[in-house]
Amino acid sequence: MSAKDYTTETGSGGELHQKAGGDVPPLTTQVGAPVSDDQNSLRVGRRGPTLIEDQAFREKIFHFDHERIPERVVHARGYGAHGYFETYESLSDITAADIFQRAGEKTEVFVRFSTVAGNKGSMDLARDVRGFAVKFYTKEGNWDLVGNNIPVFFIQDAIKFPDLVHAAKQEPDSDFPQAQTAHDNFWDFISLMPESMHMIMWIMSDRAIPRSFRFMQGFGVHSFRFVNAAGEARFVKFHWKPKQGLQSVLWDEALRINGADPDFHRRDLWTAIQSGDYPEWELGVQVFDDAFADQFDFDVLDATKIIPEEILPVRPIGRMVLNRMPDNFFAETEQVAFQTGNIVPGIDFSEDPLLQGRNFSYLDTQLKRLGSPNFNHIPINAPRCPFHHFQQDGHMAMHNPRGRANYEPNSWGGDQGGPREVAQGGIRAVPVAYSGEKARIRSETFADHYSQARQFYISQTPVEQKHMADALTFELSKVKTKPIRLRMLAHLLNIHEDLAQAVAAGLGVKDMPAPAQPAVPPRTDLPESPALSILKNGPDSFAGRKIGMLLTDGSDVAQVKAIVDAAQAEGAMVQFIGPIAGSVVLSDGTELDLDEMVEGAPSAVFDAVAILPSDDQAEMLAKMAAARDFAATTWAHYKFAAFNDAARVLFAKAGLPQELDEGFIPASDAKGFIAACRDLRFWGRKNAA
Ligand code: HDE
C-alpha cells in the first residue's frame, strides 16, 4: 500500500472515511471548487516541501488563523437562545411602541445571558452579575433591552465604568484572578466607592450564583420612558420574572460545579430547550409619572436604587418563551450586538447618567469587536422589518442603496429618490426642558448610599443573610491588604451592625473601625421588601429540576421506576449515575444505560438525589471516595434525597448521622419525595446544625 493509499483511499478513519456522493455533498473551497484531497497538502515528492500553489491548503489555514474576534470587554462569556415575546394586552394608552399595541401578538426575540468579569473561557458559576440582554425584532425596528439579573448597578456615572471593570477583572501585572472579585484591586476600589454598597449587597447574595439562567430574574435597571401617540411620557422600569421560580446554588456547590462542569449554565439551557422544556419569563413594568418621581425617597435617575415592588407594583405586560437554540454559536451568540441605543418609537431614554454613557459605549464597542460599521448586516443583528437608509459601503457591506439616490433631500422622486422621513410617528425624543450651568457635578439626590443596601439586607431570610456574611468574609479573606478589609467593615457598619459584626468575626478583626463618614445619614426606617428575597419567592413545583440517581447492579427496578414516574409527572428530569460509566443491570435483569459515573457527577450538579444501591453492591459503593462524597455533600448542601436501606451502608461511611432527618425520604415514598423536593432544600438541617 502506498503512503497516499494509507491516508486517503482507506483513510485513517477506515471505512468511515466516506467520499461525496448520494446525499453527501462535495467538500469545496470557499469559492466552490470541489476538493479531491483534504488529508495531504500538495508537495514535491513523498517527503518534499509543500508548494505555495496549494490554494486549498492556504485558504484553509488563512481562514483558521483569523477565526477569532476580540471578546467582549465585559460580558465575554455568554449563551444565547431564540424565542418569542407575546403581548398580553394593548398598552396604547401609555406607549406607542408597536410591540405593545395588540394582545396576543408574537414578536421574535434573541436573548443572551452572560457573566460579566470572566473571560470567554471562564466558568459559569463565578460569583458575578449575570447579563440578561434581549433583542426584540419589532415591526418598527429592533429594540434592545440590555439588562442584568440584578436591578441596581455599582456606579452612578458611566465615567467610572472603566475603573470598575479594571478593578474587577484580573490584576494587570499578574493577570489573575480570573472571573472573581475576591482580590485586593476590586475591594480597594469598592471600599473607596460608597455608591456601590447597595450593589455589593446584591452580588454578595445568592443572586450572584444562580442555579441556572432559567431561574433568575432580569431587570432593565434604569428608568426609561414610555411615550404614547399623543406624546405623553411616563417613566418605566422593566422586570423579567421567571415562570420557573427563583433558585440559586450554595457557594460550596458553585465551587464544585465549576470543577465538574464549567459549562453548567450553558448545558442547562441547551438541555432544557432541546428537550422541549421551554423556559419562560413574564415581562413586567413599573410605570410612574413625574409626580411619583418627585415624591419618591430616592432619585429615579440613580441606577444604584430600586423602586420597591411593594410601593409600586410590577404590572405584567407579556411573556417571553425561549424555544430554539442557535444553529451556530459564533454566528448568533458571539456576533449578536446589543445596544442600549436601539429603541423604537414609543420608548425613550431617561437622563440616568449611566444610561446616557452606555448609549455611546454599545455602538462604539461593536466596531471593535465586529470590525465594521456594517455589523447590523449580520443576520442576527438585522431587523426583521423592512429598512431603508442611505448608509453605504464599508467593510463587508451587504446592503447598499439601490438606484441613483444615496443622499437626501434629492429631487429624483419616485423609484429613484429613495426613502424619506416619516410624517407621523417615528423616533421622537420626549421634549424634556433642561437648563443649568455646564459643570462636572452630581446631584445631591444621588447621595444616599446605604439606606437601600440595608433594606436589601433586612429583606432576606436568616439563611440568606448568613450567606451574605459568608460571601463577604470569603471575598475579604482573599484581600491581603488589611486596611482594605477595615474600610469595608466601616461601610458595613452603615448598612447593618449584625452583618458588620459577622464579617468582622470571620475575618478575626478585633478592633472594629468607626463607621464610614456618610454623605447623608443612612436611614433605618425603610421597610422590608419581601420581593427582594430568593427564598421568599421560590417555585411551587419541582418542574425543570434535575435528580441524580445513584445506582449499582442489582438496584431495585420498582424503586427506580417509581421515582422516575413521579419525577416525570412533576416535569423534572432524572439522570442515572453508576460506580463506573456504561450501564447497570437492575434487579429484574434489565440493562439501564447510565448518563454519568459517580466520579464525574458530584451531587452539586443536581437539585436532589436518589441513592439506591443494591444490598450486594452497597459495600463496594461505600468504598468509593466519590460515592461517599456524593452522599456527604447531599447532606451538607441541605438537599433532599430518596434512599433505600442499603444506602445506609454508604451513609455510615460518608459520615452522615445515624438519625437521618426529614429531608431524607425512603424510596418507597416516591411521590412524597418529589413533593418534598418542591422546597428545593431542607433548610431545617441547617437550622439544626
Ligand atoms: Fe454593559 N456593556 N455597560 N451594562 N452590558 C457591554 O457592550 C457599559 C451596564 C450589559 O450579551 C459592552 O456589546 C458601560 C449596566 C449586558 O452582548 C459595553 C456601562 C447593565 C451586556 C458595555 C455599562 C449592563 C453588556 C461590552 C456603564 C445592566 C452584554 C460588549 C455605564 C443594565 C450584552 C458589548 C451581550 C455589555 C458598556 C453598565 C448590561 C462595553 C459603559 C448598568 C447584559 O459596551
Image (tube, rainbow, N blue to C red):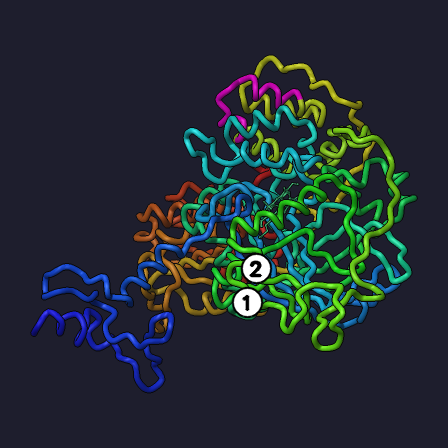
- Residue lying at the far bottom in this picture: please name it: 22
Q: Which of these two is toward me, 532 or 162? A: 162
Q: Position of residue 578 (x, y in %)?
A: 36, 59
> What's the residue at 53%, 44% (across, down)?
73
Amino acid type at image mark 2: Asn
Seen from this angle, which residue lies furthest front?
411
Is residue 126 visible in the rendered image? The answer is yes
Q: Nearer the viewer, residue 623 or 384?
A: 384
Magenta-highlighted residues = 475-490
Residue at the top extreme, as displayed:
511
Q: Quadrant of residue 34?
A: bottom left
Residue 370 at x, y percent in the picture: 52, 54
How far is disc 1 from disc 2 in space, using C-alphas?
8 Å
Decide: marks 1, 2 in contact (CB < 8 A)?
yes
Identify the residue position indicated by label 1 in the image: 398
How dense is the environment of label 1, judged by Cα within 10 Å: few (below 14), some, or many (20 and up)? few
Q: Is residue 35 above or below residue 23?
A: above
Residue located 59% across and 34% down the image? 164
Q: Quadrant of the C terminus?
A: top right
Which label was assigned to residue 374? Answer: 2
Kindly state the secondary structure of the residue where label 1 is placed.
Answer: loop
- In the image, is the residue at mark 2 within 8 Å of ligand 1 by its beta carbon? no
- The type of residue carrying mark 1 is Met
Q: State the image quarter where residue 495 is shown.
A: top right
Q: Is residue 668 visible?
A: no
**Mark with earlier residue (1, 2):** 2
Q: How many marks?
A: 2
